Amino acid sequence: MFVRIVEYLSWCIGVIGILVIFYGSIISILKFIKIENKRFKGKMSLSDVDSLRLTLGTYLLLGLEFLIAADIIRTILQPSFEEVAILGAIVTIRTVISYFLDREIEDVQEHHTIDSKIKI
C-alpha cells in the first residue's frame, strides 16, 4: 500500500514538472510572437528578448527541479545499484543544466537591471 502511494506521488510530481515546463513554453511562445510583431514594426528592444529568456529559463529550471524530486522519490522505492547509478547520472545531468540555466537567468536579470538604470 505504502509503495503504491509513493509511486503515485512520484508520478504526480513528475507530471507537475512536465506541466510546468509545458506551461512556461506556451507563455514563452506567446511572448515570442509579441516580440516578433514588435520587431516587424521596428519597436523591439533587447529588454523584451531578455524578458523572454528569463521567463523560459525560470520555468525550465522549476520544471527540472520537480523532475529531479520525482526521480529521487522513485529511486527510494527501488534502491538497486543500477537504479541508484541511473538516478545519479540523471541528477548530475539535470543539475548541470539547472546550474547553467540559473547562471543565464542571473545574467539576464543583471542585464535587465542595468538597462533599467540607464533609462532613468
Image (cartoon, helix red, strand yellow):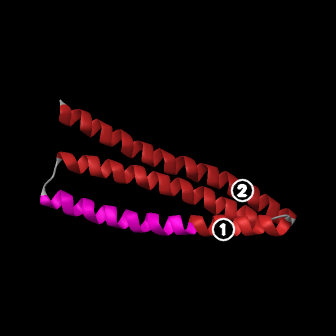
Tell me if residue 21 comes above or below residue 108 in the rendering: above
Crowding around mark 2 (Cα neighbors within 10 Å: few <14, some 14 to 19, many 20+) is: few
* SS state under label 2: helix
Q: Residues within 10 Å of mark 1 (few under 14, many from 20)?
A: few
- What is the residue that sits farthest to the top in this orientation? 1
Judge whether residue 45 can be spotted in this image.
Answer: no
Q: Position of residue 116 (x, y in %)?
A: 78, 64
Question: The C terminus lies in which quarter of the figure?
Answer: bottom right
Looking at this rendering, what residue extends furthest in the left direction?
80
User: As rendered, which of 53 and 28 lies closer to the eye?
Assistant: 53
Q: Is residue 96 magenta?
A: yes
Q: Quadrant of the N terminus?
A: top left
Instruction: Please name the residue shown 15% across and 61% down the image.
Output: 82
Instruction: Identify residue for label 2.
Output: 33
Q: Residue at x 58, y 57 (%)?
A: 56
Front disc: 1 or 2: 1
Name which quarter of the figure residue 118 lies in: bottom right
Magenta: predominant secondary structure element? helix
Tags 1 and 2 touching, CB below 8 Å: no
Q: Does 9 appear in magenta? A: no
Instruction: State the image coordinates of residue 49 (x, y, percent, origin top left).
Output: 70, 64
Left or right of 34 in this view: 43: right
* Left or right: 107 in relation to 94: right
Helix, strand or loop under label 1 = helix
* Occupied quadrant, residue 52: bottom right
Q: Amino acid at mark 2?
A: Ile
Q: Which residue is mark 1?
A: 110
Horizontal and vertical percent position of residue 4? 21, 34
| Position above or below: 7 against 109 | above
Extent of the magenta region: 81-104
Could you tell me which residue is drawn at 55 percent across and 46 percent down?
A: 23
